[in-house]
Amino acid sequence: MKDKDYLMIPGPTPVPETVLMAHAKHPIGHRSKEFSAILNRCHAGLKWLFQTENDVYILTSSGTGAMESAMSNLVNPGDKVLSLVIGNFGARWGKIAASHGADVEVMEVPYGQAIDPEALKARLAADTNKEIKIITLTHNETSTGVTNPLADLMAVIKEHGALSVVDGITSIGAMDCPMDKLGIDVLVSGSQKGFMLPPGLAFIAVSERAHEARKETKYPGFYFDWVATRKSYNQETTPWTPAVNLIVALDAALQMLQEEGLQNIFDRHTKNAQILREGLKEMGMKLFVEDESIASKAITSVYPPEGVTVPEIRKTMKEDYSIVVANGQNDLKDKIFRMGTLGFVCERDVLTALASLKATVKKLAK
Ligand SMILES: Cc1ncc(COP(=O)(O)O)c(C=O)c1O
């Protein structure tokens, strides 16, 4: 019998049956009172998850759409953007900013490392004329499995005063990312990650400071414009036709998350990642990120054992056990593989994946 594929990739992540059933309902009109009530509940739930009093907008796009929204609403041609890059997804910010005419400076570290707050402090201290308008950073870098020391980096950014634009795409709903406490200006995420939903929605929380900055933006674009988005948000609707069924599913998913509670969600991710890392080490496998203080709770990158290749592992895991694990990206392709513990994942899933990996390696080892 062909079993269902079990996704242990960092997105899309597994979706609970309750959420799938909600998604499967007949669509309802997006200008109806019924839909406004669902939308309002979702907005309240998202504010809870983002730990913010700011508006959190629901966009019909993947996570990159929310990144685009941040840049199109904030960047004027020639604006200086400092992009903190620790992997593939961090690099995306700079590319988007440049496409809106920004003058992008990249501060990067070798893959597998996090940004050092002291190095950032030194760079920002040199910006005596306060030329840097925006600083972009990634909370959890999915391509490597490294989590930046967000609170320390945010403290340095706040001291400088630039607008902080943070990718929380694989951290929201998995790790503590308190927007208001840390003073983040713009925080983005995507549905197919910690939200336990299929792909198709993005989320963007926008501070008053960022809304103020938007007023000076000459070419904010149309579809993602925060002025239109905010106007509709205040009228309990969306500017354009939203992905109605995904929002109905979001309502169900947020209810599940709220029943679990924020701290329990974070603890579950911490525990599952620990079990995975310990299990991998017990099997004699080498972790790509050995420093526990920056190792992600959502995604673990691993080197294949001697004599076994990444494509072989991925193929056998999928064919023999219907478990899908991710390859490395760019320079790390076929050098590491990545196992997700993000979203709707329980301890049994992790133990099953470890046992399957063990059997896979045994089968493949020459
Ligand atoms: C950290 C991070 N940022 C951005 C993205 C891009 O999101 P999407 O593929 O939903 O556009 C991803 C997707 O995996 C991600 O993990």
Image (cartoon, rainbow, N blue to C red):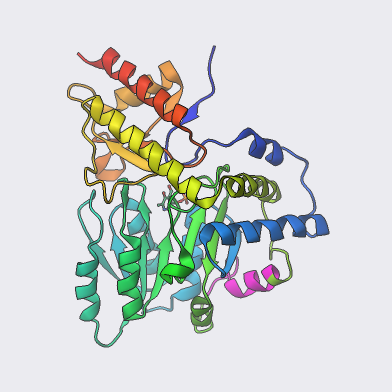
The boundaries of the magenta stretch are 220-233
Q: Place residue 196 in its image quadrant.
A: top right
Question: How many labels sit on residues?
Answer: 0
Relative image position of residue 54 (x, y in whole percent):
56, 70
Q: Is residue 144 magenta?
A: no
Q: Residue at x 25, y 24 (%)?
A: 283
Vertical placement of residue 100 versus 333, above or below = below
Relative image position of residue 259 (x, y in whole percent):
61, 46
Report the side of 91 relative to 215 (left or right). left
Q: Residue at x 45, y 48 (%)?
A: 266
Q: Is residue 32 visible?
A: no
Q: Quadrant of the N terminus?
A: top right
Q: Quadrant of the C terminus?
A: top left
Relative image position of residue 180 (x, y in whole percent):
48, 69
Vertical placement of residue 341 versus 92, above or below = above
Q: In the current view of this chain or complex, which residue is farthest to the bottom? A: 129
Vertical placement of residue 363 versus 295, above or below = above
Q: Is residue 228 magenta?
A: yes
Instruction: Using the image as rendered, state which of residue 142 and residue 243 is in the foreground.
Output: 142
Q: Residue at x 33, y 72 (%)?
A: 155
Q: In the current view of this chain or complex, which residue is farthest to the left? A: 306
Q: Is residue 335 visible?
A: yes
Q: Residue at x 37, y 42 (%)?
A: 299
Vertical placement of residue 178 versus 163, above or below = above
